[in-house]
Image (spheres, grey):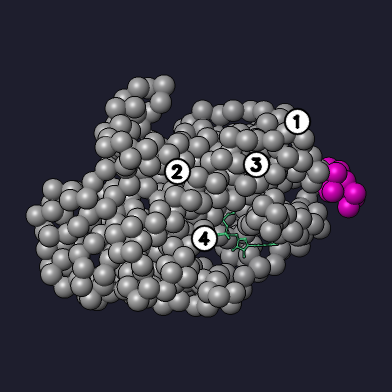
Amino acid sequence: MVTINVVVVGAGYVGLVTGLCFAKLGHSVACVDVDESKIKALRQGQVPFYEPGLVELLGEQVQEGRISFHTTFPEPTDAAMAVVAVGTPPTPTGSADLTSVFMAVDGLARALPHGAVVAIKSTVPVGTASKLKERLAAQGRPDLRVASVPEFLREGQAIQDVFRPYRMIFGVMDEATEQMLRTVHEGLDAPVVVTDTATAEMIKYASNAFLATKISFINEIANICDRVGADVTQVAYGMGLDPRIGPSYLRAGLGYGGSCFPKDTRALVNIAGEAGYDFQLLRAVVEVNQRQRLEPVRRLKESFGTLAGRVITLLGVAFKPGTDDVRESPAIDLYVALMAEGAVVRMCDPVVRRVRGWISGASKILDVCNDPYLVLAGADAAVVVTEWPEFVALDWRRVARFMRCPVVFDGRNVLKPDEMKMAGVVLLSVGRGCRS
Ligand code: NAD
Protein backbone atom coordinates (compact mmCIF):
# COMPACT_ATOMS: atom_id res chain seq x y z
CA MET A 1 0.00 0.00 0.00
CA VAL A 2 1.12 3.56 -0.73
CA THR A 3 1.46 5.94 2.22
CA ILE A 4 0.16 9.43 1.48
CA ASN A 5 0.81 12.56 3.51
CA VAL A 6 -2.59 14.11 4.22
CA VAL A 7 -3.47 17.46 5.81
CA VAL A 8 -6.93 17.65 7.38
CA VAL A 9 -8.21 21.18 7.98
CA GLY A 10 -10.76 21.31 10.81
CA ALA A 11 -10.57 18.84 13.70
CA GLY A 12 -14.30 18.71 14.54
CA TYR A 13 -16.54 15.64 14.24
CA VAL A 14 -15.86 15.15 10.55
CA GLY A 15 -12.22 16.23 10.38
CA LEU A 16 -11.06 14.29 13.40
CA VAL A 17 -12.80 11.05 12.50
CA THR A 18 -11.65 11.36 8.86
CA GLY A 19 -8.08 12.08 9.92
CA LEU A 20 -8.06 9.11 12.27
CA CYS A 21 -9.53 6.91 9.56
CA PHE A 22 -6.77 7.84 7.09
CA ALA A 23 -4.17 7.31 9.83
CA LYS A 24 -5.60 3.88 10.58
CA LEU A 25 -5.45 3.07 6.86
CA GLY A 26 -1.69 3.72 7.13
CA HIS A 27 -1.34 7.30 5.90
CA SER A 28 0.50 10.09 7.66
CA VAL A 29 -1.98 12.73 8.83
CA ALA A 30 -1.55 16.31 10.07
CA CYS A 31 -4.74 17.82 11.52
CA VAL A 32 -4.95 21.62 11.60
CA ASP A 33 -7.55 23.60 13.55
CA VAL A 34 -7.75 27.28 14.47
CA ASP A 35 -9.19 26.38 17.87
CA GLU A 36 -6.12 26.25 20.12
CA SER A 37 -7.92 24.62 23.04
CA LYS A 38 -9.11 21.82 20.76
CA ILE A 39 -5.60 21.16 19.47
CA LYS A 40 -4.18 21.28 23.01
CA ALA A 41 -6.74 18.72 24.20
CA LEU A 42 -6.09 16.45 21.21
CA ARG A 43 -2.35 16.56 21.83
CA GLN A 44 -3.08 15.36 25.36
CA GLY A 45 -5.13 12.49 24.01
CA GLN A 46 -8.48 14.07 24.89
CA VAL A 47 -11.37 14.33 22.46
CA PRO A 48 -13.12 17.71 22.91
CA PHE A 49 -16.57 16.24 22.23
CA TYR A 50 -18.38 13.01 23.03
CA GLU A 51 -18.19 10.30 20.39
CA PRO A 52 -18.08 6.60 21.32
CA GLY A 53 -14.73 4.88 20.65
CA LEU A 54 -12.89 8.02 19.53
CA VAL A 55 -10.59 8.42 22.56
CA GLU A 56 -9.32 4.87 22.07
CA LEU A 57 -8.77 5.34 18.33
CA LEU A 58 -6.98 8.64 18.97
CA GLY A 59 -4.69 7.06 21.58
CA GLU A 60 -3.88 4.20 19.22
CA GLN A 61 -3.03 6.41 16.23
CA VAL A 62 -1.01 8.94 18.27
CA GLN A 63 1.00 6.03 19.66
CA GLU A 64 1.55 4.70 16.14
CA GLY A 65 2.87 8.17 15.26
CA ARG A 66 0.55 8.48 12.28
CA ILE A 67 -1.38 11.59 13.31
CA SER A 68 -0.28 14.99 14.62
CA PHE A 69 -2.17 18.16 15.60
CA HIS A 70 -1.39 21.78 14.70
CA THR A 71 -2.86 25.25 15.00
CA THR A 72 -1.21 26.49 11.79
CA PHE A 73 -0.24 24.85 8.51
CA PRO A 74 3.22 23.52 8.30
CA GLU A 75 4.29 25.81 5.36
CA PRO A 76 5.18 24.43 2.92
CA THR A 77 3.83 20.94 3.54
CA ASP A 78 4.61 17.84 1.53
CA ALA A 79 1.00 16.66 1.69
CA ALA A 80 -0.27 15.25 -1.61
CA MET A 81 -3.83 15.63 -0.40
CA ALA A 82 -5.68 18.05 1.85
CA VAL A 83 -9.14 17.50 3.27
CA VAL A 84 -11.26 20.52 4.13
CA ALA A 85 -13.63 19.64 6.98
CA VAL A 86 -14.37 23.02 8.53
CA GLY A 87 -17.85 24.11 9.57
CA THR A 88 -20.33 25.64 7.11
CA PRO A 89 -22.92 27.10 9.49
CA PRO A 90 -26.11 28.71 8.22
CA THR A 91 -26.26 32.44 7.59
CA PRO A 92 -29.40 34.27 8.80
CA THR A 93 -30.96 33.69 5.36
CA GLY A 94 -30.35 29.93 5.57
CA SER A 95 -27.58 29.66 2.98
CA ALA A 96 -24.23 28.08 3.95
CA ASP A 97 -21.56 30.42 5.33
CA LEU A 98 -18.37 29.59 3.43
CA THR A 99 -16.03 31.93 5.33
CA SER A 100 -14.12 29.06 7.00
CA VAL A 101 -13.90 27.09 3.74
CA PHE A 102 -12.37 30.11 1.95
CA MET A 103 -9.90 30.68 4.81
CA ALA A 104 -8.88 27.04 4.76
CA VAL A 105 -8.44 26.96 0.98
CA ASP A 106 -6.46 30.21 0.97
CA GLY A 107 -4.15 28.71 3.59
CA LEU A 108 -3.76 25.56 1.51
CA ALA A 109 -2.92 27.67 -1.56
CA ARG A 110 0.18 28.89 0.30
CA ALA A 111 1.11 25.54 1.78
CA LEU A 112 0.49 22.67 -0.66
CA PRO A 113 3.02 21.27 -3.13
CA HIS A 114 2.45 21.28 -6.90
CA GLY A 115 -0.52 19.23 -8.11
CA ALA A 116 -1.92 18.35 -4.67
CA VAL A 117 -5.61 17.48 -4.26
CA VAL A 118 -7.90 19.67 -2.15
CA ALA A 119 -10.84 17.44 -1.18
CA ILE A 120 -13.84 19.31 0.17
CA LYS A 121 -15.65 17.29 2.83
CA SER A 122 -17.56 20.21 4.31
CA THR A 123 -21.14 20.36 3.05
CA VAL A 124 -21.08 23.21 0.53
CA PRO A 125 -23.56 24.63 -2.01
CA VAL A 126 -23.58 23.10 -5.45
CA GLY A 127 -20.95 24.81 -7.58
CA THR A 128 -18.56 25.58 -4.70
CA ALA A 129 -15.78 23.23 -5.89
CA SER A 130 -15.71 24.99 -9.26
CA LYS A 131 -15.59 28.38 -7.53
CA LEU A 132 -12.74 27.17 -5.32
CA LYS A 133 -10.83 26.00 -8.38
CA GLU A 134 -11.15 29.53 -9.83
CA ARG A 135 -10.18 31.05 -6.48
CA LEU A 136 -7.02 28.94 -6.36
CA ALA A 137 -6.15 29.86 -9.94
CA ALA A 138 -6.56 33.54 -9.07
CA GLN A 139 -4.02 33.01 -6.28
CA GLY A 140 -1.49 31.57 -8.71
CA ARG A 141 -2.33 27.93 -7.92
CA PRO A 142 -4.09 26.54 -11.02
CA ASP A 143 -2.11 23.32 -10.45
CA LEU A 144 -4.10 22.38 -7.33
CA ARG A 145 -6.91 19.89 -8.00
CA VAL A 146 -10.26 20.38 -6.28
CA ALA A 147 -12.53 17.45 -5.45
CA SER A 148 -15.88 17.12 -3.73
CA VAL A 149 -15.90 14.18 -1.31
CA PRO A 150 -19.04 14.68 0.81
CA GLU A 151 -19.28 13.06 4.19
CA PHE A 152 -22.28 11.05 5.40
CA LEU A 153 -21.25 10.06 8.94
CA ARG A 154 -23.77 10.15 11.76
CA GLU A 155 -22.69 11.50 15.11
CA GLY A 156 -22.87 8.78 17.75
CA GLN A 157 -21.73 6.15 15.24
CA ALA A 158 -19.16 8.19 13.36
CA ILE A 159 -16.38 5.60 13.48
CA GLN A 160 -18.56 2.84 12.06
CA ASP A 161 -19.87 5.17 9.34
CA VAL A 162 -16.41 6.33 8.27
CA PHE A 163 -14.82 2.88 8.28
CA ARG A 164 -17.81 1.13 6.72
CA PRO A 165 -19.55 3.75 4.58
CA TYR A 166 -22.58 2.82 2.48
CA ARG A 167 -20.92 4.58 -0.45
CA MET A 168 -18.07 6.93 -1.26
CA ILE A 169 -18.74 9.83 -3.60
CA PHE A 170 -15.74 11.17 -5.52
CA GLY A 171 -16.63 14.37 -7.35
CA VAL A 172 -13.62 15.12 -9.56
CA MET A 173 -12.45 17.28 -12.44
CA ASP A 174 -9.78 14.90 -13.78
CA GLU A 175 -8.58 11.29 -13.63
CA ALA A 176 -5.46 12.02 -11.58
CA THR A 177 -7.67 13.27 -8.75
CA GLU A 178 -9.85 10.16 -8.93
CA GLN A 179 -6.69 8.03 -8.72
CA MET A 180 -5.44 9.93 -5.66
CA LEU A 181 -8.82 9.56 -3.92
CA ARG A 182 -8.89 5.84 -4.68
CA THR A 183 -5.36 5.45 -3.26
CA VAL A 184 -6.11 7.36 -0.05
CA HIS A 185 -9.35 5.41 0.54
CA GLU A 186 -7.81 2.02 -0.27
CA GLY A 187 -8.87 -0.45 2.40
CA LEU A 188 -12.42 0.86 2.74
CA ASP A 189 -14.90 -1.53 1.25
CA ALA A 190 -17.79 0.46 -0.24
CA PRO A 191 -19.25 1.26 -3.63
CA VAL A 192 -17.54 4.26 -5.23
CA VAL A 193 -19.50 6.75 -7.31
CA VAL A 194 -17.24 8.89 -9.48
CA THR A 195 -18.92 11.98 -10.80
CA ASP A 196 -18.37 15.67 -11.50
CA THR A 197 -18.10 17.98 -8.50
CA ALA A 198 -21.53 19.64 -8.82
CA THR A 199 -23.25 16.24 -8.86
CA ALA A 200 -21.27 15.11 -5.80
CA GLU A 201 -22.26 18.27 -3.94
CA MET A 202 -25.90 17.68 -4.87
CA ILE A 203 -25.81 14.02 -3.77
CA LYS A 204 -25.01 15.20 -0.25
CA TYR A 205 -27.84 17.75 -0.06
CA ALA A 206 -30.35 15.48 -1.79
CA SER A 207 -29.56 12.62 0.63
CA ASN A 208 -30.07 14.76 3.72
CA ALA A 209 -33.17 16.40 2.26
CA PHE A 210 -34.66 12.99 1.46
CA LEU A 211 -34.05 11.64 4.98
CA ALA A 212 -35.50 14.83 6.47
CA THR A 213 -38.54 14.39 4.21
CA LYS A 214 -39.09 10.85 5.51
CA ILE A 215 -39.00 12.18 9.08
CA SER A 216 -41.42 15.03 8.45
CA PHE A 217 -43.67 12.70 6.45
CA ILE A 218 -44.02 10.17 9.27
CA ASN A 219 -44.55 13.01 11.75
CA GLU A 220 -47.45 14.27 9.66
CA ILE A 221 -48.87 10.72 9.56
CA ALA A 222 -48.42 10.57 13.36
CA ASN A 223 -50.38 13.76 13.85
CA ILE A 224 -53.20 12.33 11.77
CA CYS A 225 -52.98 9.00 13.68
CA ASP A 226 -53.54 10.91 16.91
CA ARG A 227 -56.74 12.34 15.51
CA VAL A 228 -58.13 9.17 13.94
CA GLY A 229 -57.09 6.62 16.57
CA ALA A 230 -54.35 4.76 14.65
CA ASP A 231 -50.90 3.81 15.98
CA VAL A 232 -48.05 5.37 13.99
CA THR A 233 -45.44 2.93 15.28
CA GLN A 234 -47.35 0.06 13.67
CA VAL A 235 -48.11 2.13 10.58
CA ALA A 236 -44.37 2.79 10.17
CA TYR A 237 -43.54 -0.87 10.75
CA GLY A 238 -46.10 -1.95 8.19
CA MET A 239 -44.82 0.58 5.68
CA GLY A 240 -41.14 -0.12 6.29
CA LEU A 241 -41.40 -3.82 5.46
CA ASP A 242 -41.85 -2.76 1.84
CA PRO A 243 -38.29 -2.57 0.47
CA ARG A 244 -39.34 0.32 -1.75
CA ILE A 245 -39.90 2.30 1.45
CA GLY A 246 -37.55 0.77 4.04
CA PRO A 247 -37.85 1.09 7.83
CA SER A 248 -35.20 3.71 8.61
CA TYR A 249 -35.99 7.34 9.36
CA LEU A 250 -39.65 6.47 9.83
CA ARG A 251 -39.81 7.04 13.58
CA ALA A 252 -42.35 9.62 14.55
CA GLY A 253 -41.25 12.04 17.25
CA LEU A 254 -40.16 15.61 17.79
CA GLY A 255 -38.45 15.83 14.41
CA TYR A 256 -34.86 16.16 13.33
CA GLY A 257 -32.18 18.41 14.81
CA GLY A 258 -28.40 18.52 14.89
CA SER A 259 -25.77 20.28 12.88
CA CYS A 260 -26.75 18.88 9.47
CA PHE A 261 -30.41 18.25 8.59
CA PRO A 262 -31.80 21.64 9.69
CA LYS A 263 -29.06 23.65 7.99
CA ASP A 264 -28.76 21.46 4.90
CA THR A 265 -32.50 21.44 4.19
CA ARG A 266 -32.66 25.23 4.49
CA ALA A 267 -29.52 25.56 2.36
CA LEU A 268 -31.02 23.40 -0.40
CA VAL A 269 -34.20 25.48 -0.39
CA ASN A 270 -31.87 28.47 -0.91
CA ILE A 271 -29.77 26.77 -3.60
CA ALA A 272 -32.98 25.98 -5.49
CA GLY A 273 -34.27 29.53 -5.01
CA GLU A 274 -31.05 31.06 -6.30
CA ALA A 275 -31.37 28.82 -9.35
CA GLY A 276 -34.89 30.17 -9.89
CA TYR A 277 -36.74 27.12 -8.57
CA ASP A 278 -39.19 27.01 -5.68
CA PHE A 279 -38.52 23.73 -3.78
CA GLN A 280 -42.05 23.64 -2.36
CA LEU A 281 -41.81 20.13 -0.94
CA LEU A 282 -38.65 20.81 1.06
CA ARG A 283 -40.00 24.11 2.37
CA ALA A 284 -42.93 22.15 3.80
CA VAL A 285 -40.57 19.57 5.32
CA VAL A 286 -38.73 22.35 7.17
CA GLU A 287 -41.97 23.95 8.34
CA VAL A 288 -43.42 20.65 9.57
CA ASN A 289 -40.23 19.96 11.50
CA GLN A 290 -40.30 23.32 13.21
CA ARG A 291 -43.92 22.83 14.25
CA GLN A 292 -43.35 19.25 15.38
CA ARG A 293 -40.68 20.09 17.92
CA LEU A 294 -43.18 22.29 19.79
CA GLU A 295 -45.89 19.59 19.83
CA PRO A 296 -45.33 18.92 23.59
CA VAL A 297 -46.23 22.54 24.38
CA ARG A 298 -49.55 22.19 22.58
CA ARG A 299 -50.34 18.82 24.15
CA LEU A 300 -49.32 19.81 27.67
CA LYS A 301 -51.43 22.95 27.41
CA GLU A 302 -54.33 20.73 26.39
CA SER A 303 -53.77 18.69 29.56
CA PHE A 304 -53.11 21.49 32.03
CA GLY A 305 -55.01 24.45 30.56
CA THR A 306 -52.15 26.80 31.32
CA LEU A 307 -48.49 26.01 31.83
CA ALA A 308 -47.82 29.09 33.98
CA GLY A 309 -46.01 27.99 37.13
CA ARG A 310 -45.91 24.32 36.06
CA VAL A 311 -42.59 22.58 36.58
CA ILE A 312 -41.63 20.72 33.41
CA THR A 313 -38.58 18.48 33.07
CA LEU A 314 -36.98 17.97 29.68
CA LEU A 315 -35.32 14.56 29.52
CA GLY A 316 -32.56 14.92 26.94
CA VAL A 317 -30.78 17.97 25.58
CA ALA A 318 -28.47 16.41 22.95
CA PHE A 319 -30.14 16.34 19.53
CA LYS A 320 -29.93 12.54 19.61
CA PRO A 321 -28.49 9.82 21.87
CA GLY A 322 -24.79 8.99 21.68
CA THR A 323 -23.61 12.57 21.24
CA ASP A 324 -23.20 15.75 23.29
CA ASP A 325 -24.00 17.87 20.23
CA VAL A 326 -26.79 20.33 21.04
CA ARG A 327 -26.80 22.22 17.73
CA GLU A 328 -30.43 22.81 16.67
CA SER A 329 -31.65 20.40 19.32
CA PRO A 330 -35.45 20.49 19.83
CA ALA A 331 -34.74 20.76 23.57
CA ILE A 332 -33.58 24.36 23.22
CA ASP A 333 -36.65 25.49 21.26
CA LEU A 334 -38.85 23.64 23.72
CA TYR A 335 -37.11 25.27 26.67
CA VAL A 336 -37.67 28.73 25.21
CA ALA A 337 -41.31 28.02 24.25
CA LEU A 338 -42.16 26.56 27.68
CA MET A 339 -40.51 29.50 29.47
CA ALA A 340 -42.58 31.84 27.29
CA GLU A 341 -45.68 30.03 28.62
CA GLY A 342 -44.53 30.81 32.16
CA ALA A 343 -43.41 27.26 33.01
CA VAL A 344 -40.43 26.44 35.22
CA VAL A 345 -38.20 24.29 33.04
CA ARG A 346 -35.54 21.84 34.17
CA MET A 347 -33.19 19.99 31.85
CA CYS A 348 -31.46 16.65 32.18
CA ASP A 349 -28.96 14.82 29.95
CA PRO A 350 -26.43 12.05 30.62
CA VAL A 351 -23.59 13.81 28.77
CA VAL A 352 -24.51 17.47 28.15
CA ARG A 353 -23.54 19.69 31.10
CA ARG A 354 -24.63 23.13 29.91
CA VAL A 355 -26.21 24.69 26.90
CA ARG A 356 -26.59 28.17 25.45
CA GLY A 357 -30.12 29.43 24.83
CA TRP A 358 -31.70 32.70 23.73
CA ILE A 359 -34.01 33.77 26.53
CA SER A 360 -35.91 37.06 26.15
CA GLY A 361 -33.50 38.23 23.47
CA ALA A 362 -30.37 37.51 25.50
CA SER A 363 -27.93 34.63 25.21
CA LYS A 364 -27.75 32.66 28.47
CA ILE A 365 -25.83 29.60 29.61
CA LEU A 366 -28.30 27.06 31.03
CA ASP A 367 -27.27 24.34 33.44
CA VAL A 368 -28.18 20.74 32.69
CA CYS A 369 -28.50 18.16 35.46
CA ASN A 370 -27.34 14.60 34.91
CA ASP A 371 -29.51 12.97 37.57
CA PRO A 372 -33.02 12.41 36.16
CA TYR A 373 -34.48 11.50 39.55
CA LEU A 374 -33.38 14.84 40.95
CA VAL A 375 -35.05 16.91 38.21
CA LEU A 376 -38.19 14.77 38.07
CA ALA A 377 -38.93 15.14 41.79
CA GLY A 378 -41.89 17.49 42.20
CA ALA A 379 -42.30 18.04 38.44
CA ASP A 380 -45.77 18.49 36.93
CA ALA A 381 -44.76 16.91 33.66
CA ALA A 382 -41.78 15.46 31.83
CA VAL A 383 -40.95 15.38 28.15
CA VAL A 384 -38.67 12.71 26.66
CA VAL A 385 -36.81 14.83 24.11
CA THR A 386 -33.83 12.53 23.46
CA GLU A 387 -34.24 8.75 23.50
CA TRP A 388 -31.23 8.02 25.71
CA PRO A 389 -31.51 4.40 26.98
CA GLU A 390 -30.97 5.79 30.49
CA PHE A 391 -34.40 7.44 30.35
CA VAL A 392 -36.16 4.35 29.06
CA ALA A 393 -34.61 2.35 31.90
CA LEU A 394 -35.76 4.72 34.68
CA ASP A 395 -37.71 3.23 37.57
CA TRP A 396 -40.93 4.84 36.36
CA ARG A 397 -42.96 3.51 39.29
CA ARG A 398 -40.66 5.47 41.59
CA VAL A 399 -40.76 8.49 39.27
CA ALA A 400 -44.59 8.49 39.22
CA ARG A 401 -44.61 8.53 43.03
CA PHE A 402 -42.47 11.61 43.42
CA MET A 403 -43.64 13.71 40.46
CA ARG A 404 -46.36 16.17 41.43
CA CYS A 405 -48.43 15.03 38.42
CA PRO A 406 -47.09 11.93 36.67
CA VAL A 407 -47.68 13.25 33.14
CA VAL A 408 -45.00 12.19 30.66
CA PHE A 409 -44.93 13.27 27.03
CA ASP A 410 -42.86 10.67 25.21
CA GLY A 411 -41.50 12.72 22.33
CA ARG A 412 -39.67 9.74 20.86
CA ASN A 413 -42.18 6.90 21.36
CA VAL A 414 -39.71 4.81 23.34
CA LEU A 415 -41.74 4.16 26.49
CA LYS A 416 -44.08 1.18 26.56
CA PRO A 417 -47.70 2.29 27.14
CA ASP A 418 -48.61 -0.86 29.15
CA GLU A 419 -45.61 -0.54 31.46
CA MET A 420 -46.22 3.16 31.97
CA LYS A 421 -49.85 2.51 32.85
CA MET A 422 -48.78 -0.11 35.40
CA ALA A 423 -46.25 2.37 36.81
CA GLY A 424 -48.97 4.97 37.26
CA VAL A 425 -47.71 7.33 34.56
CA VAL A 426 -50.12 9.31 32.36
CA LEU A 427 -48.40 8.82 29.02
CA LEU A 428 -48.80 11.13 26.05
CA SER A 429 -47.01 10.14 22.87
CA VAL A 430 -46.62 11.04 19.22
CA GLY A 431 -49.19 9.38 16.98
CA ARG A 432 -49.98 6.40 19.18
CA GLY A 433 -53.32 7.93 20.03
CA CYS A 434 -52.49 6.98 23.57
CA ARG A 435 -53.12 8.38 26.92
CA SER A 436 -52.47 5.39 29.18
P1 NAD B 1 -17.32 21.14 13.70
O1 NAD B 1 -17.84 22.46 14.05
O2 NAD B 1 -17.42 20.03 14.69
O3 NAD B 1 -15.79 21.25 13.28
C1 NAD B 1 -15.29 22.23 12.41
C2 NAD B 1 -13.89 22.58 12.89
O4 NAD B 1 -13.28 23.44 11.94
C3 NAD B 1 -13.86 23.34 14.23
O5 NAD B 1 -13.04 22.65 15.14
C4 NAD B 1 -13.27 24.71 13.87
O6 NAD B 1 -12.47 25.25 14.89
C5 NAD B 1 -12.46 24.37 12.64
N1 NAD B 1 -12.15 25.49 11.75
C6 NAD B 1 -12.98 26.49 11.35
N2 NAD B 1 -12.32 27.30 10.51
C7 NAD B 1 -11.08 26.81 10.35
C8 NAD B 1 -9.94 27.18 9.58
N3 NAD B 1 -9.97 28.24 8.77
N4 NAD B 1 -8.83 26.45 9.66
C9 NAD B 1 -8.79 25.37 10.47
N5 NAD B 1 -9.84 24.94 11.22
C10 NAD B 1 -10.96 25.66 11.16
O7 NAD B 1 -18.04 20.74 12.34
P2 NAD B 1 -18.38 19.27 11.82
O8 NAD B 1 -19.60 18.79 12.49
O9 NAD B 1 -17.15 18.44 11.83
O10 NAD B 1 -18.79 19.61 10.31
C11 NAD B 1 -17.83 20.00 9.35
C12 NAD B 1 -18.50 19.98 8.00
O11 NAD B 1 -18.92 18.66 7.67
C13 NAD B 1 -19.76 20.84 7.89
O12 NAD B 1 -19.83 21.40 6.61
C14 NAD B 1 -20.88 19.85 8.10
O13 NAD B 1 -22.06 20.26 7.48
C15 NAD B 1 -20.33 18.62 7.42
N6 NAD B 1 -20.85 17.36 7.95
C16 NAD B 1 -21.05 17.19 9.28
C17 NAD B 1 -21.53 15.97 9.75
C18 NAD B 1 -21.80 15.76 11.22
O14 NAD B 1 -22.52 14.83 11.55
N7 NAD B 1 -21.24 16.56 12.12
C19 NAD B 1 -21.81 14.93 8.87
C20 NAD B 1 -21.56 15.13 7.52
C21 NAD B 1 -21.08 16.35 7.06
For the residues carrying marks 3 and 2, which lies nearer the camera in this image? 3
For the residues carrying marks 1 and 3, which lies nearer the camera in this image? 3
Mark seen at residue 288? none
Q: Would you name the residue on which mark 1 appears?
A: 174
Indicate whether residue 213 is drawn in magenta: no
Is mark 3 in CB contact (under 8 Å) with mark 2? no
For the residues carrying marks 1 and 2, which lies nearer the camera in this image? 2
Q: Is mark 4 on a helix, strand or loop?
A: loop
Ligand 1 rendered quadrant:
bottom right
Is ligand 1 within 8 Å of the beta carbon of the residue shown at mark 2?
no
For the residues carrying marks 4 and 2, which lies nearer the camera in this image? 4
Q: Which of marks 4 and 2 is nearer the N terminus?
A: 2
Q: Would you name the residue on which mark 2 appears?
A: 161
Q: What residue type is labelled 4?
A: Arg
Is mark 1 in CB contact (under 8 Å) with mark 3? no
Q: Earlier in the sequence, mark 3 or mark 2?
A: 2
The magenta segment is: 134-144
Q: Quarter holding the N terminus?
A: top right
Separation of marks 1 and 2 at Cα, in angstroms: 27 Å
Q: Position of residue 433 (x, y in %)?
A: 26, 43
Q: Would you name the residue on which mark 4 appears?
A: 327
Closer to us: 325 or 417: 417
Q: Which of marks 1 and 4 is nearer the N terminus?
A: 1
Q: Where is residue 425 in the image (x, y as percent from the top left)?
A: 17, 59
Q: Which amino acid does label 3 sit on?
A: Leu
